[in-house]
Structure formats: C-alpha cells, structure tokens
C-alpha cells in the first residue's frame, strides 16, 4: 500500500513540475532537487524527508501539459513516485514511459494527501475512503518498458536476450 504525498489540480504544466529556469540541469541524478521547486513546502518535503518508493502524487486533468521537457518526468522518477491523474498530457505520458515513471490515468480518482492507496491489475483502491476507481490500462508494450525501468533499460534487455 502506498500513501498520497501530494495532490494537485488540473492543468499542471511541466513548468510547474520542473521550472524552466532549471533547464541547464539535465542529469537525472540532479533534476529531482528541483521537483515542484515553486511549492517550497513540498519541494522541501521531497528533498529532506525519506519519500517511500511508490508514494503517490494525485493530479487532475491534463497533468504534465505544456512543453515537451522530459526533465518533468525525470525529476519525479528520481523519487520513484507514481502519478495517478484524471488525465495525463500525451507528451508527458510518453516521456514518463520512456523514463520508466509509473503513471496511471484514473478519470474518477478521488484522494487526498495522506490517503492510503492500493493498485491492482484492474482498479485503484483508496483504502482510506473505501472507494475504488477504474483506470485506463496501458498497452503491454508500454507496460514492459515501464517495468524495465525505461526505454534504454528495455532496449538493453532485448539486446541481451538476443545474445
């Protein structure tokens, strides 16, 4: 079971997730320190508290809209969080898959910070409220890429299988 560590509304752009003024920092090992940098409290929480892998960020519609900067996905991947949103922008979704960031589109999701969430093969269960929500499955090919840790890891695995 995972805990919701942050909840945001609709139309959260890549500039909110990873502000453009940090674009000179592109190394995946460095980008996490700038996640949600303009929300000082949450950014500090990410940087100073031990965030459990699999912790959850809840988003509204159009999470990750805006530019195509992949740092918005890599900054979240650095904390090994899961993004569950009512809707995820197409480019952010593809960047997330390519980087191995787990994302789930659950159009009716209802959750608050601190809620306990369980994800199974069919639904997202909010154990705090007792409600369950359907989510949109991703294709088996995309799921394999995410499970491998991203496109580069997936390609390496496929190359090793051939040898």
Image (cartoon, helix red, strand yellow):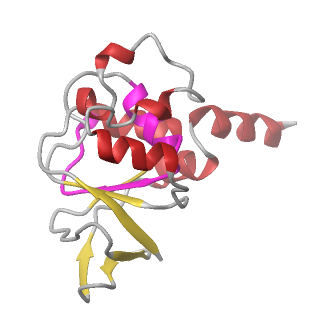
- What is the residue that sits farthest to the right in this orientation? 163
The answer to whether 139 appears left or right of 155 in the picture is: left
- Residue 48, given in percent of the width and then of the height, sits at 51, 47
Q: Quadrant of residue 44?
A: top left
Q: Quadrant of the C terminus?
A: top right
Please tell me which residue lies in front, 10 or 46: 46
Whether residue 135 appears in magenta in the rendering, the answer is: no
Q: Residue at left 45%, top 35%?
A: 75
Q: Residue at left 73%, top 34%?
A: 156
- Residue 19, given in percent of the width and then of the height, sits at 30, 24
Q: Residue at left 32%, top 14%?
A: 21
The answer to whether 102 appears left or right of 128 in the picture is: right
Please tell me which residue lies in front, 67 or 36: 36
- What is the residue that sits farthest to the top in this orientation? 24
Span colored in magenta: 70-90
The answer to whether 24 appears left or right of 59 in the picture is: right
Residue 64 visible? The answer is yes
- Residue 70, given in percent of the width and then of the height, sits at 41, 26
Q: Residue at left 31%, top 75%?
A: 115
When the figure is inspected, residue 90 is found, relative to residue 31, above or below; the finding is below
When the figure is inspected, residue 147 is found, relative to residue 93, above or below; the finding is below
- Residue 61, given in percent of the width and then of the height, sits at 14, 49
Whether residue 82 appears in magenta in the rendering, the answer is: yes
The answer to whether 59 appears left or right of 156 in the picture is: left
Residue 101 visible? The answer is no
């Amino acid at each position: 079971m995972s805990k919701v560590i942050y909840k945001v509304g609709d139309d959260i752009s890549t500039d909110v997730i990873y502000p453009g003024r940090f674009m000179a920092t592109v190394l995946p090992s460095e980008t996490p320190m700038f996640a949600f940098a303009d929300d000082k409290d949450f950014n500090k929480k990410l940087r100073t508290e031990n965030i459990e892998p699999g912790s959850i960020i809840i988003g509204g519609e159009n999470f990750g809209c805006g530019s195509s900067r992949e740092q918005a996905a890599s900054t979240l991947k650095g904390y090994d969080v899961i993004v569950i949103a009512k809707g995820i922008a197409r480019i952010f979704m593809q960047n997330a898959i390519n980087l191995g960031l787990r994302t789930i589109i659950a159009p009716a999701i209802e959750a608050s910070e601190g809620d306990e969430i369980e994800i199974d093969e069919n639904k997202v269960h909010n154990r705090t409220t007792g409600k369950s929500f359907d989510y949109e499955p991703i294709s088996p090919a995309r799921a394999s890429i995410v499970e491998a840790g991203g496109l580069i890891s997936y390609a390496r695995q496929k190359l090793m299988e051939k040898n």
